[in-house]
Image: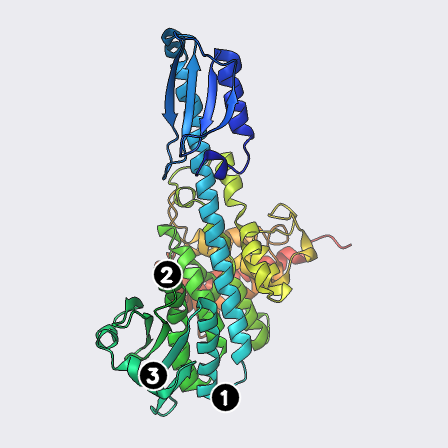
Amino acid sequence: MASIQDYLFDTALLTATLAYLADHHGLTVTVHDSSGQPLLRHGPGHADADGASQFHPFRFVSDIGGLTCAAESEQALTNAAPHIAFALTVLDSQLEREVELRETSEEMLQLSSQLNFLYKLARKIIGIDDLARCYEIILSEISQAIGADHAMIATKGRWEEKIQVSYNLTPQQRTAIESRPSFKNAAGGGTIIFTCEDGASLLYSPIKEKEGHSGYVVFARTRDHRFFSAYEKKFVSIIENIISPTFETLRLYDSLQDLYLNTVKALAAAIDAKDEYTHGHSFRVAKYTIAIGRHLDIDQKQLNDLEIAAYMHDLGKIGISEAILGKPGKLTAEEFREIRRHPEFTDKILQPIKLPAFIVDAAVQHHERLDGTGYPLGLAGENISSFARVIAVADVFDALTSKRPYRDALSVEEALRILCDGIDIKFDRTVVLAFLRALNHEEGRGEMLATINVNLQFAAIQNLNTFLIELADFIINKESLRPSA
């Protein structure tokens, strides 16, 4: 039977609550499970005929029992009522917090599992030129991940030819599935679960491309196995949203880099969506980061890794309450400490995936500062990942030039001055200079900024070029004024 002990990570609070009611108010307090069986008891015991008792259920999403408080008399029980109510409020609040923590942990584990799956899948199909073979691997890996008995893909090849791939299916079994009325009714639309006439459970997911649907993926379980679950539907839906454009990319360009990058973009967008003020933040930070990287002469392979790290830099915000992320006023000290934990959560999400350490370090360290005042590790100078120093500048610039619940967006010029004032203190000089060069590039300037963020504000857009040159001169002159070692 269910009880409060099943949901409290640490039962010390429960024990202390019982002791408080017993020792200070003379009550005998008994904890019951959902079936009414006593689990814990504290107090002197009140067996007199004139004694009084009352049962108080715990406020929870399901029945987990409650407390029975007994006293020598009705009057004594009445006198203790406010204290009983307070104790129950404390326990109910702790239960609610424990549930939230469990849900967040489960969500983080699911996210980590999905990232891990996609990373391993991408590694298995890298370098495979045969599209049919590539689809076979994808179908087999997803089928095993969700426990499907059979599966099939129908889509287009490079020159619009039909490609049909099966997993544990004979041609006759495939034809039988495709001829079922329930299957024909499911064609199109989104990812769905349905039951066939013979009791088999099917999970159908369309393959979407720019011009519409180019095919479908179907997973099946026979009637003697359980139906597909909502989690498995969600898992396939996430994979479908990433693999559908990847199928098109493979078909047209044979590019597998997009498979992993689209995964990261989709997850980053999901995190940004937790807060209405951060929509598109990860996208913009990644674009600024790549622009900086190009002007640091980083090669294309490293640019790809840098882009992935930039998209991942805020994944840990999935573990932060939306109420804190979107709070319109000033954060309390406790709330600020909670916000500062998101790089730790990012690290926990990424560690099981076995990504190269420099990608993880870049995502986790983007709030570190050269003078050691950053977080989560308080790293300083060269101890901070070079990629993280690039993402830090891009992240701060986008944060400053974006509207937040507690302030309006700053102009581009104001944000750049803040970055320049922080050179050699908080931000890497070479990175800031590279950012200014990117903004001042002949093919970029205001046009480049506008394509990344259409809501940017300028003090005087027509004078942006001159302003950028002046800032670059300021940085160079600042360097010449530094005392020699």
**Which residue bears the numbered disc 1?**
129
* Secondary structure found at label 2: loop
Q: Which residue is drawn at 64% across and 60% down?
A: 385
Q: Which residue in the protein does label 2 denote?
A: 229
Mark 2 vs 1, N-terminal side: 1
Circle 3 is placed at which residue position?
A: 174
**Mark 2 crowdedness (10 Å alpha carbons): few <14, some 14-19, many ≥20:** few
Residue 165 vs residue 458, the one in the foreground = 165
Residue 471 at x, y percent in the picture: 53, 59
Q: Give whichever of discs 3 and 2 has the lower sequence position.
A: 3
* Residue 473 appears in the figure: no
Q: Which of 196 and 77 is in front in this view?
A: 196
Given the image, on which type of amino acid does mark 2 rest?
Answer: Ser
Q: Quadrant of residue 481?
A: bottom right
Query: Left or right of 417: which side holds 378?
Result: right
Q: Which amino acid does label 3 sit on?
A: Arg
Residue at the location (40% across, 46% down)? Answer: 322
Front in this rendered view, residue 209 or 472: 209
Picture quadrant where residue 381 is located: bottom right
